[in-house]
Image (cartoon, rainbow, N blue to C red):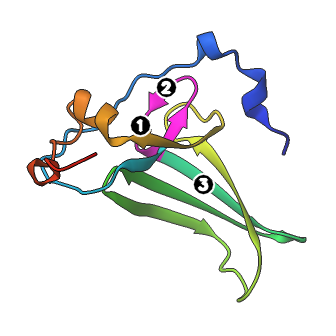
Amino acid sequence: MSDDNSIYQPDKINWDINLPANTENVLKREYSLFHCFYCGIHPQVICETHVKGFNDFIQIRLINILPNSEEIMFVLGDQFPKDVETIDYLFCGMCGKPGHMEDVPEFILIANGIINPNEKNSNDD
């Protein structure tokens, strides 16, 4: 699969963050979240996994990715043989278009009310 991200113009990419608010304190600095260029950052992801070199094996998973957790909601397809290399393709669970994982800094999630600031981090540099 070619780099589909290069066809999108930066001024047309949706950077809205559509995640539920979380009241738990978490100590991470960055969170790996799914980013759809059309729908923004949200938790619904379709992951299509192929075994490298074998076109016979495919698995599709519906995943809910939040800042502090990742939950596999549904698995469809083959169980893979052990010790194989896999390739994952990520698609938006809302519109079906390709997306990718984006490292989102903690301060952006705090500023948007997604996570509460950790009061224990008062000694940050």
Kind of residue at badge 3? Cys
Quarter of the rendering containing residue 38: top right
- Identify the residue at image location x=64%, y=16%: 10
* Residue 12 image point, x, y percent: 61, 12
**How far separated are the C-alphas under marks 2 and 3?**
17 Å
Q: Secondary structure at mark 3?
A: strand
Q: Residue 42 magenta-drawn?
A: yes
Residue wearing tag 3: 47
Q: Residues within 10 Å of mark 1 (few under 14, many from 20)?
A: many
- Given the current orientation, which residue lies at the most extreme right position? 53
Could you tell whether 8 is left or right of 114 in the image? right
Kind of residue at badge 1? His
Q: Mark 1–mark 2 contact, CB under 8 Å?
A: yes
* Residue 18 image point, x, y percent: 34, 30
**How far separated are the C-alphas under marks 3 and 1?**
14 Å
Residue wearing tag 1: 42
- The magenta stretch is 34-44
